[in-house]
Image (cartoon, grey):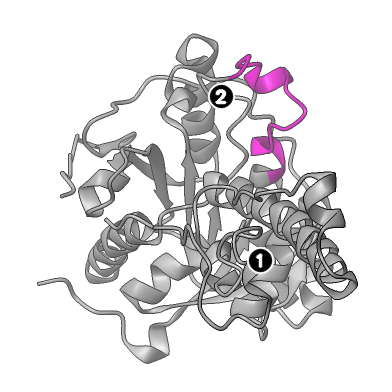
């Protein structure tokens, strides 16, 4: 049975590249952690975070995160850093420019670790991270962690392992520093380090592996979202318009759907045959459709980049076992 972290040992977490909060949702499932600040640049994702976690401050730009900027929003203690860093530099679906891609934020990630000096860190990315630049990029990540005194475990967990209907494999890196205690950022020395995560590779894409000491592999052990396809009912619009905006009575459901809704447009002659009030309502429906489409496009992008909370929960459970063992050994 996993040894639980007691309330007084609740880990203070800084969530980088937060997206819509999947990483933090994961530790809420696991328990024993508290996110003290988000970092997310996308405005739509910021809206979702503000809705779900209105009490947690957001720093929009990762380049602005320093000990001083954290202190200004009241964050003086950080035990761990979690980060779902951008995956396009490493994705098999892209050009895989890795270290020369401007979207590669591993350099900023290590800069923040150098400043905040957490006890642990977790990084999530696509499996292509393991083989980018002939595996040298990942090798560099392991080297950077080792230079800062961290032991590292890494491996791949799939969303299908937690009951999802899709595969969605992701590599997870867990780094822990047995020599560091809770970091009080108010006493931190501002000393930027010259890390440069340029190239990475190596590692195993099946079980969790350790980059130091002996191998200690850890094996880790749907919901279909439907969309309303017809309107009908007493939706407040004339029956002639019921078939125009699909699901008009279920706007909330649409925001949870995985496809862009459709709009059955009327011809000019059909619109002209409507009464003036119906014409006005038809135009209102079409404007509503366009707004929903824009909203849903942003939502689909956010979901596509999101971390599966149940997968993150598995990783946090593993982290708790590591921290408990470190506490026993100290």
Q: Nearer the viewer, mark 2 or mark 1?
A: 1
In the image, residue 196 lies at what x, y percent?
A: 69, 30
In the picture, which quadrant includes the N terminus?
Answer: bottom left
Q: CA distance from mark 2 to mark 1?
A: 50 Å
The residue located at (45%, 20%) in the rendering is 201
In the image, residue 3 lies at what x, y percent?
A: 19, 75
Front one among 228 and 315: 228
Front one among 75 and 50: 50
The residue located at (28%, 46%) in the rendering is 165
* Residue 37 visible within the image: no
Q: Is residue 93 above or below residue 249?
A: above
Residue 71 disc label: none
> Which residue is denoted by mark 1 in the rendering?
240
Q: Is residue 248 above or below residue 95?
A: below
Task: Point out the stretch of residues depicted in magenta.
Answer: 94-108
> Which residue is denoted by mark 2 in the rendering?
90
Query: Is residue 40 shown in magenta?
Result: no
Residue count near mark 2 (Cα–Cα under 10 Å), binned few <14, some 14–19, many ≥20: many
In the picture, which quadrant includes the C terminus?
Answer: bottom left
The residue located at (72%, 65%) in the rendering is 46
Left/right placement of residue 52 relative to residue 290 reads left
Residue that sits furthest to the top in the current view? 134
Locate residue 184: give its quadrant: bottom right
Left/right placement of residue 234 relative to residue 212 reads right
């Amino acid at each position: 049975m996993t040894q639980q972290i007691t309330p007084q040992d609740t880990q203070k977490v800084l969530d980088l590249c937060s997206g819509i909060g999947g990483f933090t949702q994961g530790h809420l499932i696991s328990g024993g952690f508290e996110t003290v600040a988000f970092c997310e640049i996308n405005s739509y994702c910021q809206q979702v975070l503000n809705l779900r976690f209105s009490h947690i401050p957001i720093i929009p730009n990762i380049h602005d995160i320093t000990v001083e900027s954290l202190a200004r929003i009241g964050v003086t203690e950080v035990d761990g850093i979690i980060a779902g860093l951008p995956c396009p530099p490493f994705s098999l679906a892209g050009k895989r420019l890795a270290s020369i891609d401007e979207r590669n934020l591993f350099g900023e990630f290590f800069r923040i670790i150098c400043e905040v000096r957490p006890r642990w860190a977790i990084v999530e990315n696509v499996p292509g991270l393991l083989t980018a630049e002939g595996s040298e990029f990942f090798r560099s990540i392991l080297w950077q962690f080792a230079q800062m005194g961290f032991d590292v475990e890494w491996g791949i967990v799939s969303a299908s392992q937690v009951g999802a209907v899709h595969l969605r494999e992701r590599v997870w890196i867990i780094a822990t520093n047995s020599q560091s205690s809770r970091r009080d950022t108010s006493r931190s020395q501002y000393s930027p380090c010259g890390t440069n995560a340029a190239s990475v590779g190596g590692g195993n894409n099946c079980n969790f592996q350790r980059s130091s000491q002996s191998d200690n592999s850890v094996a880790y052990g749907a919901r279909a979202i439907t969309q309303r396809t017809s309107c009908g009912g007493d939706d407040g619009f004339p029956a002639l318009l019921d078939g125009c905006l699909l699901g008009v009575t279920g706007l909330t459901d649409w925001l949870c759907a995985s496809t862009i809704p459709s709009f059955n447009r009327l011809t000019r002659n059909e619109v002209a045959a409507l009464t003036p009030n119906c014409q006005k309502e038809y135009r209102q429906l079409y404007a509503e459709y366009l707004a929903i489409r824009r909203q849903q496009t942003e939502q689909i992008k956010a979901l596509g980049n999101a971390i599966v909370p149940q997968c993150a929960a598995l990783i946090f459970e593993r982290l708790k076992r590591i921290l408990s063992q470190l506490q026993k050994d100290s």
